[in-house]
Image: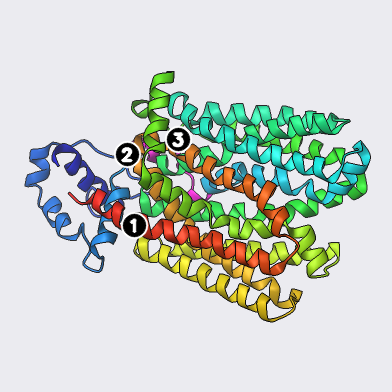
Amino acid sequence: MGRGFGLGFEVWLRTSRRVGSTEPGSDARPRGMAATVATSQDAAAAQNPAYRLASLFLRPRNLGADDSALTTLVGFAAMNPDARTLWQAPSWGLAVLLACLGMLGPFSIDTYLPAFTGIARAIGASPVEMQQTLSAYLFGFAVMNLFHGALSDSFGRRPVVLGGLAVFTLASIGCALSQHVGALVFFRAVQGMSAGAGIVISRAVIRDMFPPADAQRVMSQVTIYFGVAPAIAPMVGGYLFIHAGWHTIFWFLTGVGIVLLLAIWKLLPETLHSTHRQPFNARHLLHGYWALASNPRFLTLALASGIPFNGMFLYVLSAPVFLGDLLHLAPDEFFWFFLLSIAGIMSGAFLSGRMAGRIKPSRQIRYGFLIMGGVSIANLALNLLFVPEAWWALFPIAFYSFGWAMMVPVVTLLVLDIVPERRGMASSFQACIGSSANGAVAGVISPLVMHSTIALAATSLAMMSIGVFAWLWVKPRLARQSTP
């Protein structure tokens, strides 16, 4: 217990006071911003009546044993003690900046999908070779995700993000200048290897800067803004392809990289405190990777957050066949699918933010899985009983997206706080697991099941079920880990 326990109480007291409180020493602050951890001695903490009063409420009466343990698990994880002074603007401003970083990935995929056929004709590539440009991006994204976060734990968040954006910009130029499929595959792989820095580091930055409830709100805001990208990227890509040719899609991505590079350079502070940096050497890195890879709680939580996403992503990857061949939608009607799916993600993320600090973490996760499970079963049953029609077949995917977005911010924070001293590496490993699953779905599973709505629905249900079983297995073990 000792000193750390006293500090934990102080953080809890500071961050749980009403925003803008005028009581003496209340640390009034902008909504959502983290309170600075003040130093205190064990004896002072023990004699302070406020600390003794706080101990009565640290384990809220309406929480079960498992829920209290989960709250404790994330409640005292180290964050930057200078967070309040690093970012004094509203928290939504930081959420927008970090969401723009995360949007780089979807933009890199979805802007060039409408030009798939046109690019293939222009450079003489077969459909299989064009699919390799997507798979190369996804696997490059997955592989480098192992390193972005670990490097940021040693060198800081800013240098890794700025380096990733610089490489992404150069790779986009390479894609724009490519004249044959081999060059395009290579530069797409480099794009994937660099684009992942944004989403990996953004998660670590959020937890560096905010205590758990506020971090969940900001994570939900990021998800809301992030959800805009898959909706508008195909429209932008299609417009550029029709009016200016496929090369301009990658020149557009070059411009996006430059703008983000300048914005991050100007606006994003270094959020990793100097006392939290990890030594950079091969032995230390390997030890950190092994600690995560051998931690069943970490791996299972990563599966619980990453695999169910593919129940929705499967339909995105299969969109040309699913929407065009099976639902008989014209290309200019595809936007209904993206519009409904993104609306589900944004509304689920909004609700998750509203639930933060009000609903038990485990209950929120349970609600998300119940929605995804019920919708998946109904989707399979409908496809078994009826001929699929667009007017009803798109709505189960939207409701599934809603359930996923409602629970994933909570699970992501649990993942990061299993190893608070290695949040960057944890974010990297989590993203690598999810991206590897995405790559497998894109390269293997989607081509096998995309021609049948029944197969798509059954596969989506199977992926959701993996997440459910992972959560049911890990929840009691997290509780035992957190119990003194």
Check disc 1 and report the residue beneath it.
Answer: 475
- How far apart in space, not on screen, are marks 1 and 2 (Cα)? 22 Å
* Mark 2 crowd level (few <14, some 14–19, many ≥20, 10 Å Cα): some
Segment tinted magenta in the rendering: 80-92
Residue 326 position (above or below residue 310): below
Mark drawn on residue 78: 2
Of tags 1 and 3, the one toward the viewer is 1
Q: Which residue sits furthest bottom?
A: 385
User: What amino acid does circle 3 point to?
Assistant: Gly
- How far apart in space, not on screen, are marks 2 and 3 (Cα)? 13 Å
Check disc 3 and report the residue beneath it.
Answer: 424
The residue shown at (35%, 34%) is 421
The residue shown at (36%, 62%) is 362
* Mark 3 crowd level (few <14, some 14–19, many ≥20, 10 Å Cα): many
Q: Earlier in the sequence, mark 1 or mark 3?
A: 3
User: What amino acid does circle 2 point to?
Assistant: Ala
